Amino acid sequence: MSKIVKVIDSMMGTGKTSYAIQMMKEADMNQKFIFVTPFLNEVQRIKQEVTNKDFKEPNVTHGSGTKLESLKRLIANGEDIATTHSLFAMADEELIDLLRWENYTLIVDEVMDVISMLQGLRRDDIPVLLDSGLIKISEENQVIWQADPTLDTKYNIVRDYALAGNLYAVNNTAFVWNFPAKIFDLFERVYIMTYMFDGQLQRYYYDLHNVKYDYFSVVREGNRYQLQPKSEIIEDRSRLREFIHIYEGKLNEIGEIKNSLSKSWFENSHNCVKVKRLKDNLYNYFRNVQKANADRILWTTFKDHSNKVKGKGFSKVESENKVSGDVGLACFTSFNLRATNRYRHKEVLAFCLNRFMNPIEEHFFLQQNVKVDEDLLALSDLLQWIFRSAVRDGKPVHIYIPSRRMRDLLKKWLNNEL
């Protein structure tokens, strides 16, 4: 990899997206952009605010029946494009070949899911694939498809990812897909806009694939936003210590053990009584401690276990990709929520989980001699989630974090100890 990615690593609310919009509006008309963001409503924002360019959104009516085909068509036509992480992550060899012929600038709003465990395989599928000679696994744990590339079997997804060079085995028990790292070398310039990049999996993925990156921050000077090399000076978080009020009391007793409220804790059938206690604690915090109505409440836990914890008056959920307007109506959101301002009116928060890496993903990186800092990973998700709320506007928020580990990480960050 020869391209140097510019990581705009600035705290939430400092104007990263505003800088990107300013840059696109002031760019030469011949400069083409692909802007990638997590949510469709942010795609609409780019289309509306970058008024000097005609940003196109991939749509089934533009292609041959799928949004991926539409995206390829738009690239082939040299259009300015605004799209979502989920669609861009589907990049295949044909899309990569199209990018080789165009001089796009890539702007990615927030880090992407650059690795994921391949779903749908059964326990004995990998031994069957190996014993039949359909695949082999290299010394670097890369999955190599050895059979005829046109062979049509129930393992077509394994075939396609392996042929693209994006599939790795973990302990011969699972397959992990990698976003094709070579794609970042095909753009004229690449910008990643986030905060605490050092604690995010995309950073470790870049290290694994030798993608070079430099850190920058955004500063506002009058009505303009400027990009500058990231300073080594530690941020002043004293004002945030005044705005973020962390609950301290008996409701925290449930999370004293280090792995309490982790995904395995929720999945352990022996903890069903404790999960019920967490549900009661959450209701108590919202209704009795904070006396909050639904309009003020925002909370999260692992999505698969949210039904065990949600209570009357704060259970509303909405799909981020099927919403209209600027105000989020939900009380519950995913814990890795990023890049949206729709919940900036929420003042009473609860982060009811303890974030650890997926063991398969952890083993994948360890096989490649890359060690992930799980505390920074957990803190990054927690901060991103908190900054969806009123604190991004400098308003006070009250938050219940029953996991002692997660609570301590936030306190250390607020005190500039992390």
Image: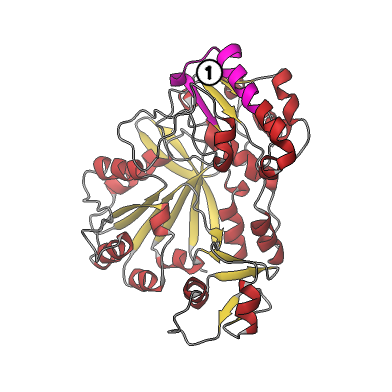
The quarter of the picture where residue 269 lies is: top right
Q: Position of residue 18 (x, y in %)?
A: 37, 38
116 shown above or below 2: above
**In front here: 183 or 88?**
88
**In front here: 357 or 309?**
309
The quarter of the picture where residue 188 lies is: bottom left
Q: Position of residue 61 (x, y in %)?
A: 21, 58
8 shown above or below 203: above
Q: Residue furthest right?
A: 257
Q: Name the amino acid type tagged 1.
A: Pro
Residue at image coords 21%, 46%: 52
Could you tell me what secondary structure mostly forms the magenta stretch?
helix
Horizontal relation, residue 223 to residue 143: left or right: left
Horizontal relation, residue 196 to residue 46: left or right: right
Quarter of the image that includes the C terminus: top right
Callout 1: SS: loop
189 shown above or below 96: above
Give, as a single range, the part of the protein colored magenta. Answer: 278-299
Horizontal relation, residue 47 to residue 397: left or right: left
**Crowding at label 1, few (<14), some or many (≥20) Cα neighbours within 10 Å?**
some
Evaluate whether residue 412 shows in this view.
no
**In front here: 123 or 5?**
123
Evaluate whether residue 146 shows in this view.
yes
Residue at image coords 21%, 51%: 54
Horizontal relation, residue 322 to residue 418: left or right: left
Residue at image coords 57%, 66%: 121
- Residue at mark 1: 396
